[in-house]
Image (tube, helix red, strand yellow):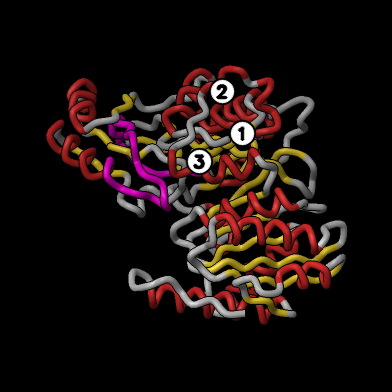
Amino acid sequence: MKLHEYQAKQLLARAGIPIPEGRLATTHEEAEAAARALGGTVVVKAQVHAGGRGKAGGIKVAKTPAEAREHASTILHMQIKGLRVRKVYVERGAQIASELYLGITLDRDRRRPVVMLSTVGGMDIEEVAEKEPEKIARGWPDPLVGMLPYQARALCFDAGVPAAQRNAVAEIAIKLYGVYARTDAMLVEINPLFIQTDGSVLAGDAKLDMDDNALFRQNELRDWKEISPDEEVEERARALGFSFVQLDGDVGIIGNGAGLVMATLDAVQRAGGRAANFLDVGGGAKESVVRSALEIVLANPKVKSVLINIFGGITRGDEVAKGILSVITTHPPSVPLVIRLSGTEAEAGRKLLEGAKLVSKTTMDEAATEAVRRAAETRGVAGDSPPAIHR
């Protein structure tokens, strides 16, 4: 479960971490009123469950309430990574001298949380980790005792935090660790953490992703969950037990087993295409499960072809075929289906699919190449007539 910035900042404020004063707005009139109430320069920020808001134009500085109204009007009509912006957070502007990064997540190799601090803030931390890993200091608190003061101070020295701010940043790191632990977070991040011109330290942004498996004991935060219409498909997929991630390509992907699905995404990319999603139906999927998976993928209007890659172990090929046929017969898809079926009862599945309007291939690479080609064909005829489907 992801929280919006304004929600995450409420948690930071409760923990005693300084944040800029801000107000939520769902219309440009409310944004103007919020800017007037805050006074001075404000920042209008899109509230969506996606990163890269600044690069997408979803964060703008306004020097007057009228300018805040204009920015809100623009941002509230935007889509960021496929998500429509329906609310903005209007926040008092900061006097920025420099920016830090502070984040906490789980280090699976060490089986304990890792606290990361860097003087290269305001950037994608993944990019910093790849190009300049030496600029990220790391500490691994014991989860049974939490982050201790000496560990926080050592982290500040390692990262090169200016002496004047070391105590303040160390204190924020300890408090942020408390937020991470209390909320069952998988990731909590302040990026950027501002050092202001007067020397004070302020959380400029906040991100918090919670572990869905722990929501049963997070009563208040569970009520904060917001699902936009753009996220309903992902939510439906998860409710059905699928591992599902929406991507930005146009080749729909269904497979069984996370490794096979990842390999299928790679095969599609090698063939020159881009996957529209990651969907793992898991092991032993029955007819109804396959049908639901196919319906979810086909519900995405960006999908121009679907690649179903099944390597049957405990998953039976005939059950997969029945699921596909139930979709084809009840509401025939308007895009080509390409299937690669192998393993348990694969031959029986292929016999069931004989005569069906789909393309069958023997290997994963052949199927990926065909799915990419069919997607290109569909794009070419979009708006003219339904694509031709041949077996």
Residue 200 located left or right of residue 336? left
Q: Quadrant of residue 26?
A: top left
Q: Position of residue 248 (x, y in %)?
A: 48, 60
Q: Position of residue 204 (x, y in %)?
A: 40, 36
Q: Quadrant of residue 177?
A: top right
Label 2 element class: helix
The residue that disc 2 covers is: 221
Q: Considering only order in the chain, which callout, 2 or 1, is on the residue closer to the N terminus?
A: 1
Q: Considering only order in the chain, which callout, 3 or 2, is on the residue closer to the N terminus?
A: 2
Q: Position of residue 65 (x, y in %)?
A: 15, 31
From the image, state whether disc 2 or disc 3 is nearer to you.
3
Q: Specify whether residue 128 is in view.
A: no
Residue 223 located left or right of residue 326? left
The residue that disc 3 covers is: 232
* Location of the C terminus (image quadrant): bottom right
Residue 117 falls within the magenta-colored stretch = no
Q: CA distance from mark 3 to mark 1?
A: 18 Å
The three-letter amino acid code for the residue at tag 2 is Leu
